[in-house]
Image (cartoon, rainbow, N blue to C red):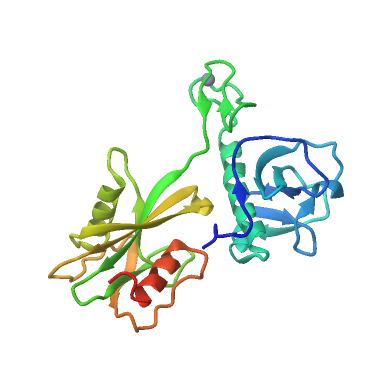
Amino acid sequence: MIQDIAPHQFHNEFEPREPHSNDFLLSYHGNNVLLKPDHTFFHYDEVSSSRSFTYLFRIDDTAFYLTDLTDQNTISMPFRFARSYEPKFLGFACITGWQLYRWYQENQYCGTDGTKMIRDEKERAMRCPTCGQLIYPRINPAVIVAVINDHNQILVTKYAHGPYQKYALIAGYAEIGETIEQTVIRETFEETGLHVSDLKYFKSQPWSFSSTLLFGYTCRVHGDCRLTLQKEELRLGEWKDRNEEIDSMDNASLTSEMIRMFKEGKFD
Ligand SMILES: [Zn+2]
Protein backbone atom coordinates (compact mmCIF):
# COMPACT_ATOMS: atom_id res chain seq x y z
CA MET A 1 0.00 0.00 0.00
CA ILE A 2 0.98 3.61 -0.43
CA GLN A 3 2.38 3.97 3.11
CA ASP A 4 4.46 0.78 2.92
CA ILE A 5 7.84 2.35 2.22
CA ALA A 6 10.14 -0.08 4.06
CA PRO A 7 13.09 -0.18 4.48
CA HIS A 8 12.53 3.59 4.67
CA GLN A 9 11.01 4.91 7.89
CA PHE A 10 8.52 7.74 8.17
CA HIS A 11 9.04 10.05 11.17
CA ASN A 12 6.16 12.41 11.81
CA GLU A 13 7.35 13.59 15.23
CA PHE A 14 7.25 17.39 15.25
CA GLU A 15 10.97 18.10 15.64
CA PRO A 16 11.69 21.03 13.31
CA ARG A 17 15.31 21.57 12.34
CA GLU A 18 17.19 23.79 9.92
CA PRO A 19 17.27 22.37 6.36
CA HIS A 20 20.31 20.39 5.21
CA SER A 21 21.55 20.53 1.64
CA ASN A 22 20.03 17.18 0.63
CA ASP A 23 16.63 17.70 2.24
CA PHE A 24 13.62 17.72 -0.07
CA LEU A 25 11.32 20.61 -0.87
CA LEU A 26 7.61 20.20 -1.53
CA SER A 27 5.69 22.94 -3.26
CA TYR A 28 2.04 22.85 -4.30
CA HIS A 29 -0.20 25.09 -6.27
CA GLY A 30 -3.90 24.28 -6.06
CA ASN A 31 -4.18 20.54 -6.71
CA ASN A 32 -0.76 20.38 -8.35
CA VAL A 33 2.74 19.68 -7.14
CA LEU A 34 5.69 21.60 -8.60
CA LEU A 35 8.64 19.47 -9.74
CA LYS A 36 11.86 19.98 -11.64
CA PRO A 37 11.40 19.63 -15.43
CA ASP A 38 12.87 16.10 -15.21
CA HIS A 39 10.01 15.10 -12.84
CA THR A 40 12.21 14.92 -9.76
CA PHE A 41 11.85 16.83 -6.49
CA PHE A 42 13.91 19.87 -5.56
CA HIS A 43 16.62 19.66 -2.93
CA TYR A 44 17.28 22.48 -0.49
CA ASP A 45 20.67 23.34 -2.01
CA GLU A 46 19.12 23.85 -5.46
CA VAL A 47 17.14 26.97 -4.58
CA SER A 48 17.97 30.24 -2.85
CA SER A 49 17.53 30.14 0.91
CA SER A 50 15.86 33.57 1.01
CA ARG A 51 12.40 32.03 1.25
CA SER A 52 10.43 30.43 4.06
CA PHE A 53 10.67 26.72 4.73
CA THR A 54 8.08 24.93 6.86
CA TYR A 55 9.30 21.69 8.40
CA LEU A 56 6.91 18.80 7.65
CA PHE A 57 8.45 15.42 8.59
CA ARG A 58 11.43 13.16 7.98
CA ILE A 59 11.90 9.93 6.08
CA ASP A 60 15.02 8.26 7.47
CA ASP A 61 17.43 11.19 8.02
CA THR A 62 16.07 13.30 5.19
CA ALA A 63 13.65 16.09 6.08
CA PHE A 64 10.87 17.49 3.90
CA TYR A 65 9.92 21.17 3.87
CA LEU A 66 6.98 23.04 2.47
CA THR A 67 8.02 26.08 0.45
CA ASP A 68 6.95 28.21 -2.51
CA LEU A 69 8.77 27.31 -5.73
CA THR A 70 6.55 29.20 -8.17
CA ASP A 71 9.54 31.44 -9.08
CA GLN A 72 11.55 28.39 -10.20
CA ASN A 73 11.64 26.59 -13.54
CA THR A 74 9.11 23.88 -12.69
CA ILE A 75 6.55 21.59 -14.18
CA SER A 76 3.15 21.25 -12.56
CA MET A 77 1.71 17.77 -12.02
CA PRO A 78 -1.67 16.82 -10.50
CA PHE A 79 -0.69 15.65 -7.00
CA ARG A 80 -2.42 12.31 -7.62
CA PHE A 81 0.46 11.37 -9.91
CA ALA A 82 2.37 10.65 -6.66
CA ARG A 83 0.26 7.53 -6.21
CA SER A 84 2.49 5.63 -8.63
CA TYR A 85 5.70 7.69 -8.30
CA GLU A 86 9.05 5.93 -8.03
CA PRO A 87 10.86 5.83 -5.69
CA LYS A 88 7.77 5.06 -3.68
CA PHE A 89 8.84 6.86 -0.48
CA LEU A 90 8.93 10.15 -2.38
CA GLY A 91 5.40 9.56 -3.70
CA PHE A 92 4.24 8.90 -0.14
CA ALA A 93 6.04 12.05 1.06
CA CYS A 94 4.40 14.08 -1.70
CA ILE A 95 0.82 13.10 -0.83
CA THR A 96 1.42 13.35 2.92
CA GLY A 97 2.92 16.82 2.37
CA TRP A 98 -0.13 17.75 0.33
CA GLN A 99 -2.41 16.95 3.27
CA LEU A 100 -0.37 19.32 5.47
CA TYR A 101 -0.24 21.97 2.74
CA ARG A 102 -4.04 21.91 2.49
CA TRP A 103 -4.37 22.07 6.27
CA TYR A 104 -2.10 25.14 6.47
CA GLN A 105 -4.01 26.75 3.60
CA GLU A 106 -7.43 26.15 5.16
CA ASN A 107 -6.50 27.34 8.65
CA GLN A 108 -4.96 30.74 8.13
CA TYR A 109 -7.61 32.53 10.22
CA CYS A 110 -9.29 31.73 13.52
CA GLY A 111 -12.87 30.54 13.02
CA THR A 112 -13.96 32.22 16.27
CA ASP A 113 -12.60 35.76 15.91
CA GLY A 114 -11.00 35.95 12.45
CA THR A 115 -7.48 36.63 13.76
CA LYS A 116 -4.57 35.52 11.56
CA MET A 117 -3.35 32.20 12.98
CA ILE A 118 0.31 31.58 13.74
CA ARG A 119 2.27 28.33 13.56
CA ASP A 120 2.88 26.91 17.00
CA GLU A 121 6.52 26.18 17.65
CA LYS A 122 6.11 23.31 20.13
CA GLU A 123 3.66 21.08 18.30
CA ARG A 124 2.12 20.69 14.87
CA ALA A 125 -0.73 23.12 15.38
CA MET A 126 -2.02 26.52 14.30
CA ARG A 127 -2.62 28.88 17.24
CA CYS A 128 -4.79 31.97 17.51
CA PRO A 129 -2.86 34.75 19.30
CA THR A 130 -6.16 36.37 20.37
CA CYS A 131 -8.20 33.52 21.88
CA GLY A 132 -5.54 30.82 22.11
CA GLN A 133 -7.47 28.27 20.07
CA LEU A 134 -5.29 25.47 18.73
CA ILE A 135 -6.09 23.76 15.43
CA TYR A 136 -4.46 20.38 14.79
CA PRO A 137 -4.22 18.64 11.39
CA ARG A 138 -7.60 17.25 10.42
CA ILE A 139 -7.90 13.50 9.98
CA ASN A 140 -11.26 12.12 8.85
CA PRO A 141 -12.00 8.53 9.96
CA ALA A 142 -13.64 6.35 7.32
CA VAL A 143 -14.28 2.68 6.62
CA ILE A 144 -13.57 0.30 3.74
CA VAL A 145 -15.80 -2.77 4.00
CA ALA A 146 -15.43 -6.21 2.44
CA VAL A 147 -18.92 -7.72 2.66
CA ILE A 148 -18.97 -11.50 2.15
CA ASN A 149 -22.12 -13.62 1.68
CA ASP A 150 -23.02 -17.26 2.47
CA HIS A 151 -21.65 -18.34 -0.94
CA ASN A 152 -18.24 -16.85 -0.06
CA GLN A 153 -18.69 -14.07 -2.61
CA ILE A 154 -17.47 -10.52 -2.07
CA LEU A 155 -19.55 -7.43 -2.77
CA VAL A 156 -17.82 -5.07 -5.22
CA THR A 157 -19.22 -1.75 -6.34
CA LYS A 158 -18.65 1.05 -8.80
CA TYR A 159 -19.03 4.68 -7.75
CA ALA A 160 -21.70 6.77 -9.42
CA HIS A 161 -19.36 9.80 -9.55
CA GLY A 162 -15.67 10.63 -9.34
CA PRO A 163 -12.56 9.64 -11.25
CA TYR A 164 -12.51 5.93 -10.30
CA GLN A 165 -14.46 3.71 -12.65
CA LYS A 166 -12.92 0.43 -11.48
CA TYR A 167 -14.32 -1.88 -8.81
CA ALA A 168 -14.31 -0.65 -5.23
CA LEU A 169 -15.67 -1.77 -1.86
CA ILE A 170 -18.30 -0.18 0.37
CA ALA A 171 -16.76 2.95 1.88
CA GLY A 172 -17.84 5.94 3.89
CA TYR A 173 -17.01 8.46 6.60
CA ALA A 174 -17.73 8.08 10.29
CA GLU A 175 -20.47 10.38 11.55
CA ILE A 176 -20.44 12.12 14.94
CA GLY A 177 -21.43 10.01 17.92
CA GLU A 178 -20.86 6.59 16.39
CA THR A 179 -18.20 3.94 16.77
CA ILE A 180 -16.24 2.84 13.71
CA GLU A 181 -18.09 -0.51 13.85
CA GLN A 182 -21.39 1.37 13.71
CA THR A 183 -20.05 3.22 10.66
CA VAL A 184 -19.45 -0.12 8.94
CA ILE A 185 -23.01 -1.30 9.63
CA ARG A 186 -24.67 2.03 8.76
CA GLU A 187 -22.71 2.67 5.55
CA THR A 188 -23.29 -0.85 4.26
CA PHE A 189 -27.02 -0.60 4.94
CA GLU A 190 -27.31 2.89 3.42
CA GLU A 191 -25.46 1.96 0.24
CA THR A 192 -26.85 -1.56 -0.31
CA GLY A 193 -29.76 -2.29 2.05
CA LEU A 194 -27.77 -5.20 3.57
CA HIS A 195 -27.70 -6.00 7.29
CA VAL A 196 -24.18 -7.17 8.16
CA SER A 197 -22.67 -8.90 11.19
CA ASP A 198 -19.49 -10.74 12.24
CA LEU A 199 -17.32 -7.63 11.80
CA LYS A 200 -13.58 -8.23 11.83
CA TYR A 201 -10.96 -5.49 11.79
CA PHE A 202 -8.37 -5.98 9.06
CA LYS A 203 -5.96 -3.02 8.99
CA SER A 204 -5.84 0.74 8.53
CA GLN A 205 -4.38 3.12 6.00
CA PRO A 206 -3.65 6.86 5.97
CA TRP A 207 -5.19 8.30 2.78
CA SER A 208 -3.89 11.84 2.48
CA PHE A 209 -5.72 12.53 -0.78
CA SER A 210 -8.84 13.16 1.33
CA SER A 211 -7.18 13.70 4.76
CA THR A 212 -8.65 10.34 5.73
CA LEU A 213 -7.68 7.50 8.03
CA LEU A 214 -9.25 4.36 6.57
CA PHE A 215 -10.28 1.39 8.72
CA GLY A 216 -10.63 -1.84 6.77
CA TYR A 217 -13.24 -4.34 8.00
CA THR A 218 -14.62 -7.62 6.76
CA CYS A 219 -18.17 -8.61 7.63
CA ARG A 220 -20.84 -11.12 6.67
CA VAL A 221 -24.33 -10.98 5.32
CA HIS A 222 -26.40 -14.08 6.11
CA GLY A 223 -29.36 -15.22 4.00
CA ASP A 224 -30.95 -12.81 1.54
CA CYS A 225 -28.21 -10.84 -0.22
CA ARG A 226 -30.23 -8.95 -2.83
CA LEU A 227 -28.97 -5.39 -3.21
CA THR A 228 -30.91 -2.13 -3.00
CA LEU A 229 -28.31 0.32 -4.24
CA GLN A 230 -28.14 3.94 -3.16
CA LYS A 231 -28.13 5.37 -6.67
CA GLU A 232 -26.59 8.72 -5.73
CA GLU A 233 -23.49 6.88 -4.44
CA LEU A 234 -23.22 3.70 -6.51
CA ARG A 235 -24.01 2.84 -10.10
CA LEU A 236 -23.19 -0.85 -9.72
CA GLY A 237 -23.01 -3.56 -7.08
CA GLU A 238 -22.07 -7.19 -7.83
CA TRP A 239 -21.22 -10.36 -5.95
CA LYS A 240 -17.97 -11.91 -7.18
CA ASP A 241 -16.43 -15.33 -6.59
CA ARG A 242 -12.81 -15.60 -5.59
CA ASN A 243 -11.73 -16.85 -9.01
CA GLU A 244 -13.53 -14.10 -10.96
CA GLU A 245 -11.63 -11.21 -12.46
CA ILE A 246 -11.96 -8.06 -10.34
CA ASP A 247 -10.47 -5.01 -12.00
CA SER A 248 -9.61 -2.98 -8.90
CA MET A 249 -7.47 0.14 -8.59
CA ASP A 250 -3.75 -0.51 -8.05
CA ASN A 251 -1.51 -1.78 -5.27
CA ALA A 252 -1.58 1.60 -3.50
CA SER A 253 -4.93 1.32 -1.75
CA LEU A 254 -6.43 -0.60 1.15
CA THR A 255 -9.32 -1.49 -1.18
CA SER A 256 -6.98 -3.27 -3.57
CA GLU A 257 -5.21 -5.03 -0.71
CA MET A 258 -8.53 -6.28 0.67
CA ILE A 259 -9.72 -7.52 -2.73
CA ARG A 260 -6.40 -9.32 -3.16
CA MET A 261 -6.70 -10.91 0.31
CA PHE A 262 -10.19 -12.14 -0.58
CA LYS A 263 -8.98 -13.66 -3.83
CA GLU A 264 -6.19 -15.44 -1.93
CA GLY A 265 -8.76 -16.97 0.45
CA LYS A 266 -7.57 -15.01 3.49
CA PHE A 267 -11.06 -13.76 4.41
CA ASP A 268 -12.83 -17.14 4.58
ZN1 LIG B 1 -9.21 33.17 17.97
In the rendered image of this protein, does residue 159 appear above or below residue 122?
below
**What residue is rendered at 64% in x and 56% in y?**
8
Instruction: Tell which residue pokes out farthest to the top in this image.
Output: 130
Residue 131, position as x, y percentages in the image: 52, 16
Task: Decide if residue 142 is on the left or right side of residue 53.
Answer: left
Task: Decide if residue 38 is on the left or right side of residue 103.
Answer: right
Q: Quadrant of the C terminus?
A: bottom left
In the rendered image of this protein, does residue 39 appear above or below residue 205?
below
Residue 210, position as x, y percentages in the image: 49, 51
Q: Within the image, what quadrant is residue 52 found in?
A: top right
Task: Decide if residue 108 is on the left or right side of residue 228.
Answer: right
Task: Decide if residue 33 is on the left or right side of residue 216.
Answer: right
Q: Within the image, what quadrant is residue 4 found in?
A: bottom right
Q: Within the image, what quadrant is residue 19 found in?
A: top right
Instruction: Tell which residue pokes out farthest to the left in this image.
Output: 223
Nearer-the-camera pick, 201 or 31? 201
Residue 236, position as x, y percentages in the image: 32, 71
**What residue is rendered at 28% in x and 44% in y?**
179
